Image: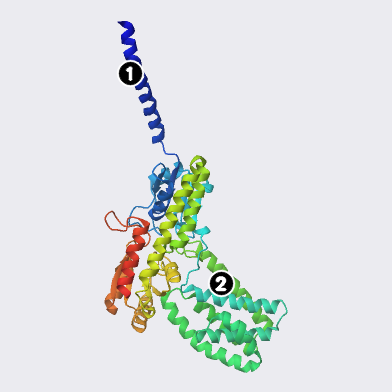
Amino acid sequence: MLHAMRAALAPLVLILGLALIAACGDDEEAEPRVRVVTTTNIVADWAQNVAGDDVEVFSLLPVGADPHSYQPGAQDVARISDADVVFAVGLGLEESWLVDLVRNAATDPGAIVELGELIDPIEFQDAHAGESALLEAIAGIVHEVEDGHIPPEQGLIQIGAVLLAMEEGDDPADVCFYDCHDHADEGVDDGHDHDDEGDDDGHDHDHEGDDDGHDHEGEFVEVLIDILTHAQAGEITPAEAIEAIDELVHEMEEDGHEGDDHGHDHGLYDPHFWFDPLRVKVAVDAIAARLAELDPDRGDDYRDAAASYKAELDELHGWTAQQVEAVPQERRLLLTSHESLGYFAALYGFDVVGVILSTTTEATPSAADLAELAHEIEELGVPAVFGETTVSERLAVTLADETGVALVRLYSGSLGAEGSGAESYIGMVRANVTSIVDALR
């Protein structure tokens, strides 16, 4: 009897033992293989598509938060501290808060992966572009003089030609390579006459710019003209004028670098590369590579998932290119809440004709800035003003009301809420493209 009971219980004990082992195995699998934190929910969506459900992916920014001005809390410090890797956009997007967050969490800076550094970023095309080009052109002429390639007198003539050409709307680089050399022999008097003309015109522009409180280019031009005027009057020698201009250029360059440290502006490069699905593919590969490094046993799985997701991004790009064909070229004009659509415009053949908040959502445009944008809308026939879900639309609404054009809301720094159709990256892009095409077709 006892022997029979043992024979009957043996299979049961074996089954229960196997079940217990399996249960323990489940507990172990419940522990995330890799802990991933991302700065934005857009990046989190990319990471989750690559990582799968076995990897915990957490976005610091909730739906609707602005990555430019996010204020992290204590829970964010804990998340960063526990993370194996932190995927950030980079290129200055999170600069105002991420550095302090990493420092407070005592996180190894090597755990931070700034994806924007890997995607061949484009430069901002904003109001500072002209200032940078002017500085570069003037600095180039000064170096030519200092290196002995041209005399100081010739350098002053070329600088005068650059200023005159800028007043006429030409690119300073084009002036240096063509006008300066082609017309250098037209005479010092002609160059000085232009300087005098520029003096009055330049001062007028400077005073207009002072009302805005940020016309650095106007201040630079004003001082340049003063130096040229003193040289023309014989109050300083051409060599002394070149030396003074060299010092001025260095001061402007230093001011520019100091401005970058304030955290209110991005740097030279545009961080909004998620509006270009082809560049996102590069970021996806970088995510897969880091996950494979952290979890080599599943490296092939991460790479396969990345390849599959990149195929979806290729399909998204093809769909977008097809959709925008419905918009006539003369109506492919984008005026946005802040400068976020540069990648989209470059990839799909649009022109960004104006931005309300320049490169960052923390800026405050002046009345003169808004008046200029309203003038551009009317002069160019801009069909719509594009607001953003993560940015206050007060100014965009005002601009749209004053000009009588449509106000269209786009998803920019964040995915949409559940049920919006924009709760994934691909859904967000499709929603934005549909809105843009419907507004401009």
Q: Is residue 432 left or right of residue 200?
A: left
Q: Quadrant of residue 63?
A: bottom left
Q: Which residue is mark 2?
A: 252
Task: Give the number of the mark in front: 2 or 1.
Answer: 1
Q: Compared to 231, does 319 lie above or below?
A: above
Q: Amino acid at mark 1?
A: Leu
Sequence order check, earlier mark of 2 and 1: 1
> Is residue 391 in view?
no
**Residue 61 in sight:** yes
Is 177 placed above or below 71 here?
Answer: below
Secondary structure of the residue carrying tag 1 is: helix
Residue found farthest to the right: 148
**Residue 328 at x, y percent in the picture:** 36, 78
**Depth order, front residue of 179/102:** 179
Quadrant housing the N terminus? top left
What residue sits 50% from the left and 53% below the top?
286
Quadrant into which the C terminus falls: bottom left
* 10 Å crowding of disc 2: few (<14), some (14-19), many (20+): some
Crowding at dot 1, Cα within 10 Å, few <14 / some 14-19 / many 20+, comes out as: few
